[in-house]
Image: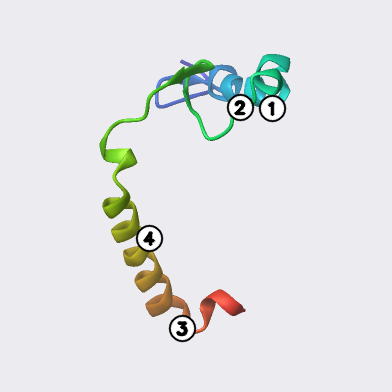
Amino acid sequence: MAGSWLGQSLEDGAATALYLATSREVREQNHRGQYFIPIATMCEPSAISRNMKLARDLWDWIDTQATEALGLDWQYQ
């Protein structure tokens, strides 16, 4: 596929973001914090993605990596 990345055309790759940014339906139904997959399909996130302990562990790991790479006060610069 010309212009594709990971099996999607550029147009298909952009379609969900464009839909969410411009859709009257999204505004009227107040879709916030929902998970959408291509193309513009709302779905339930996986159980692992809703695991708050894993989310916290990932956040802490990223924070540690950033601190080591950027210095102790990286958040405040």
Which residue matches tag 3?
71
Q: Secondary structure under badge 1?
A: helix
Query: Closer to the observer: label 2 or label 4?
Result: 4
Q: Residue at x 27, y 34 (%)?
A: 47
Disc with the residue nearer the chain's start (4 vs 3): 4
Callout 2 crowding tier (Cα within 10 Å): few <14, some 14–19, many ≥20: some
- Which of disc 1 and disc 4 is earlier in sequence? 1
Q: In the image, what residue type sits under mark 3?
A: Gly
Say left or right for 26 vs 33. right
Secondary structure category for the residue under label 4 = helix
Residue lying at the far bottom in this picture: please name it: 72
Left-right relation of 38 to 46: right
Distance of mark 4 from mark 1, alpha carbons?
27 Å
Q: Which mark is residue 8?
A: none
Question: Which residue in the protein does label 4 denote?
Answer: 59
Residue annotated with mark 1: 21
The amino acid sitting under disc 1 is: Ala
**Would you say the residues marked 1 and 3 are in contact, meaning their CB atoms lie under 8 Å apart?**
no
The three-letter amino acid code for the residue at tag 2 is: Ala
Q: Is residue 40 above or below residue 45?
A: above
**Amino acid type at mark 4:** Trp
Structural distance between the alpha carbons of marks 1 and 3: 37 Å
